Amino acid sequence: MDPDTNVSYMYVAKHNKKAMTRINDVLNRNSVLYINFIIMITCVCVLSFKLRQASAIRRSHSSTPAPKSEQASEKADSQGMSSKDVRVIKSVVLVCSIFIMSQAPFLIYSTARLINPEFDVFARLHYLFEMSAAISLTCSYLNATVNIFVYYNCNRKYKSVFLSMLGK
């Protein structure tokens, strides 16, 4: 309560800020991000594998017997995937790659902050820390901006909705 104005307000008291910052760095800024990267890469691998599997099953069920001269070329085709499946994999890999590259500066400076305590806001390496944070933020904005164009080029439904929002 402020005795001058007789107004009450809530605030967060910062007790043991150094320990809280360290826990935040370890859990939120490093562990969670590394786990997200691993999950993303695993999901892309599983997606690719499942789409290849589904494509092979689809081709085996939809193919009709062909003359022997064409069967050799069909076997090579049955190993491949449909163009739609390839586009899906390419777009997902592209979006994940852009995300990983855009979040890499954040991961690097967060890890450096754990390793070297002088790499912080009010420490000896604060100029380098602030520059790293600015680069990280710029990369995050760039990720959001680039994703608009990636989705626009890879997804027809997104493209039509986007154009309708622009009034075209």
Image: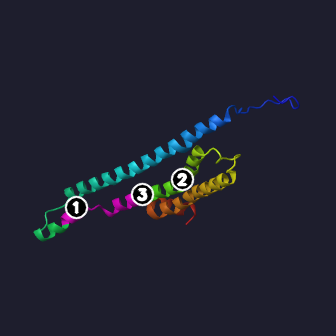
Q: Residue beneath label 1, please? A: 78
Which x, y percent locates residue 116? 60, 46
Front of the two marks 1 and 2: 2
Q: Residue beneath label 3, please? A: 93
Measured in 3D between alpha carbons, the distance from the residue under mark 3 to the one under mark 2, in whole angstroms, is 15 Å
| Residue 105, quarter of the rendered image | bottom right
Residue type at mark 3 is Val
Point out the stretch of residues depicted in magenta: 74-90
Which x, y percent locates residue 110? 58, 47
| Residue 92, quarter of the rendered image | bottom left
Q: Residues within 10 Å of mark 2 (few under 14, many from 20)?
A: some
Give whichever of discs 1 and 2 has the lower sequence position: 1
Q: Residue beneath label 2, please? A: 103
Relative depth, front residue between 76 and 115 = 115
Q: From the image, which quarter does the N terminus lie in?
A: top right
Is 85 one of the magenta-colored residues?
A: yes
Query: Which residue does the image show at 56% across and 57% down from the upper left?
Result: 144
Residue type at mark 1 is Ser
Query: Which residue does the image show at 19% across and 63% down from the upper left?
Result: 75
Q: Is residue 36 above or below residue 14?
A: below
Which x, y percent locates residue 69? 12, 71
Residue type at mark 2 is Gln
Relative depth, front residue between 37 and 82 = 37
| Residue 117, quarter of the rendered image | top right
Measured in 3D between alpha carbons, the distance from the residue under mark 1 to the one under mark 3, in whole angstroms, is 23 Å
Label 1–label 2 contact, CB within 8 A: no
Q: For numbered disc 2, what is the local secondary structure?
A: helix
Relative depth, front residue between 10 and 63 = 10
Give whichever of discs 3 and 2 has the lower sequence position: 3
Measured in 3D between alpha carbons, the distance from the residue under mark 1 to the one under mark 2, in whole angstroms, is 38 Å
Give whichever of discs 1 and 3 has the lower sequence position: 1
